[in-house]
Image: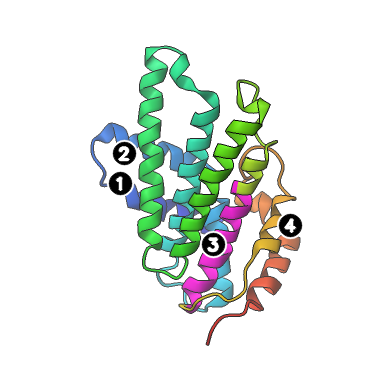
Amino acid sequence: MDEAAAVRRAARATVEEIEPARLRNALLAVIDSTSLTPGVLTLLTARIRSDSHDELEQPAAGVQLIYNGLRLTRQLAHNEPWNNGEEERRKANMHILVADVLVARGFYLLAHTNAASTAVDVVRSFGQHQAYEHRHNPEAEGEFKPGTSTAERQLKRDILELALTTGTVVADDEELTSDFQTVAKDLVETCEGSGFPAPDAFLSPTVTDRLTQSVASACVDS
């Protein structure tokens, strides 16, 4: 899928100048190993709204990087690698830094768009749901099953909503007056388990047709 390649290139370009090399390589490894569905959805949404393809890859990469960072943070919180010896602690400390850098770079790419406030809401929602799950979910202590929790499903919904919102407002350069919460919620129901499937599996013709209808009819301030 050409869109996936474009998102990966843009995401990698955002971190390729980071030093030291060990940190840069760790960042690139996360980018290369995580489903690119959020970024691809952002890019496709923007292209539905606009005939111009100029400068759409960077906002798509911003959404992707925020997702990568939050997903990695979630994995660290539940796997608790600090309890598995010195080597695992060193890896975990590096991964904490990687997660922080990914989210920060994602925010940087969205900072001057009308999707910036939605990105802030996603991170705030993530923190709230993670804290609630830690306090109230017995599975959060050593028996966590990826893909089954409310917090994980909420992260997927929030990221998909951010992707749809970002693609729309970047293409039109306007404030979005409607939202994509219902569309994002329905999309999450199509993918089970931890994380997202590959973009070509997630964005089936049926899903793409529905997205085209929803995005094309989104109400934007004129």
**CA neighbours of label 3 inside 10 A, class few (<14), some (14 to 19), many (20+):** many
Task: Give the Cα separation between the discs numbered 1 and 4.
Answer: 35 Å
Q: Secondary structure at mark 4?
A: helix
Which mark is on residue 186? 4
User: In the image, what residue type sits under mark 3?
Assistant: Thr
Q: Is residue 137 above or below residue 206?
A: above
Tag 3 or tag 2, which sits nearer the N-term? 2
Q: Which residue is found at the position 52% from the left and 78% from the top? A: 50
Q: Is residue 118 above or below residue 126?
A: below
Residue 107 image point, x, y percent: 39, 56
User: In the image, what residue type sits under mark 1?
Assistant: Glu
Residue 120 image point, x, y percent: 46, 57
Asked if residue 13 lies left or right of residue 178, the reply is left
Tag 4 or tag 3, which sits nearer the N-term? 3
Which mark is on residue 42? 3
Residue range of the region highlighted in magenta in the rendering:
155-172
Judging depth in this view, the residue of 93 and 6 nearest the camera is: 93
Q: Which residue is mark 2?
A: 24
Residue 84 image point, x, y percent: 46, 14
Q: Is residue 29 above or below residue 40?
A: above
User: In the image, what residue type sits under mark 2?
Assistant: Arg
Secondary structure mostly seen in the magenta stretch? helix
**Pair 1/3: label in front:** 3
